[in-house]
Image (cartoon, grey):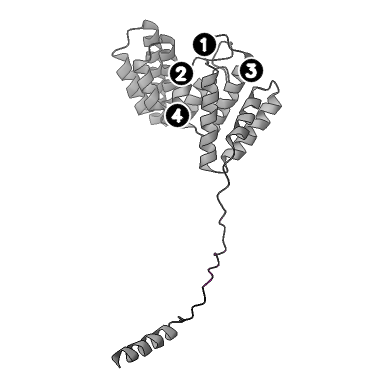
């Protein structure tokens, strides 16, 4: 008797709340809204095909290809990471360094790769950029695009300081340490200045010392200018 009454009471409560004992399956309709399905990842082969086109002698073709890769990178974080990884692999395969007479095609690929590293804020490429900081187009001076890796490190700014600081202490090549010091000087800030001052205490190469001192002075002037405003 008590079981029958309990069942009746439960049924009454359920009906009052809008529930039904019907066994008909309930169909759930997705809510409408600005939700988009995650895009399918771009095939690696397609990305590699585009990267190969970055060696084109046509600036217009390289620019179109860079924009196409940027468009793909905007589709998802996974695609962005794949593009950066493939650019790193392609750059490593070219074996760039300042003592090797690389082809013009190699430099053009490296130049476009750096344009992409800069726009994608590719901190994943910082070690590669430091390794190839001295690789340029053969022209002297610090003009734009002569040394793409150096330009990228400066643009990445504070994100690059920890790895640049480490390279300034442990890299065996004096010229590389000199260029690393210049990067830190261009990036500026307290952390970069501290790294330069720390390296100055142990640096034995007189040429590198001059670059470090110059970079410290550059940051000090900037800090003084900022305080005076």
State the residue at coordinates (55%, 49%). 38
32 within the magenta span: yes
Quadrant including the C terminus: top left
Q: Nearer the viewer, residue 199 or 17?
A: 17
Above or below, comparing residue 34 to residue 91 in the picture = below
**Which is nearer the eye, 219 or 63?**
63
Q: Image quadrant for the N terminus?
A: bottom left
Residue that label 1 marks? 98
Q: Return the x and y of residue 19 as percentages of the image width and height.
A: 45, 80
* Disc with the residue nearer the chain's start (4 vs 1): 1
How many residues crowd around disc 3 within 10 Å: few (fewer than 14), some, or many (20 or more)? some
- Mark 2–mark 4 CB contact (< 8 Å): no
Q: What's the CA distance linking mark 2 and mark 1?
A: 10 Å
Depicted 143 relative to depicted 49: above or below: above
**Crowd tier of the residue under label 1, counting other residues whose Cα lies within 10 Å: few below 14, some 14–19, many 20 or above:** few
Span of residues in magenta: 26-35
Residue 7: quadrant of the picture: bottom left
Q: CA distance from mark 4 to mark 3?
A: 28 Å
Q: Which residue is mark 4?
A: 157
Report which residue position mark 2 lands on.
131
Residue 215 shows which numbered tag?
A: none
């Amino acid at each position: 008797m008590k079981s029958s009454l309990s069942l009746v009471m439960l049924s009454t409560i359920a009906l009052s709340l809008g529930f039904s004992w019907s066994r008909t399956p309930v169909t759930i309709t997705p809510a409408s809204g600005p939700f988009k399905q995650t895009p399918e990842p771009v095939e690696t082969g397609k990305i590699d095909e585009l990267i190969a086109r970055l060696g084109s002698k046509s600036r217009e073709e390289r620019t179109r290809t860079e924009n196409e890769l940027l468009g793909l990178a905007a589709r998802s974080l996974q695609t962005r990471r794949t593009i950066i990884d493939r650019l790193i692999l392609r750059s490593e395969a070219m074996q760039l360094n300042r003592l090797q007479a690389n082809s013009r095609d190699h430099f053009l690929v490296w130049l476009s790769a750096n344009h992409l590293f800069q726009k994608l804020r590719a901190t994943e490429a910082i070690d590669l950029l430091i390794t190839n900081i001295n690789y340029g187009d053969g022209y002297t001076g610090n003009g734009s695009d002569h040394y793409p890796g150096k330009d990228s490190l400066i643009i990445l700014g504070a994100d690059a300081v920890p790895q640049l600081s480490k390279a300034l202490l442990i890299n065996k090549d004096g010229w590389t340490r000199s260029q690393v010091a210049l990067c830190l000087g261009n990036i500026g800030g307290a952390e970069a200045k501290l790294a330069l001052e720390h390296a100055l205490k142990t640096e034995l190469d007189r040429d590198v010392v001059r670059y470090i001192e110059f970079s410290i002075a550059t940051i000090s002037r900037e800090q003084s200018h900022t305080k005076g405003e």
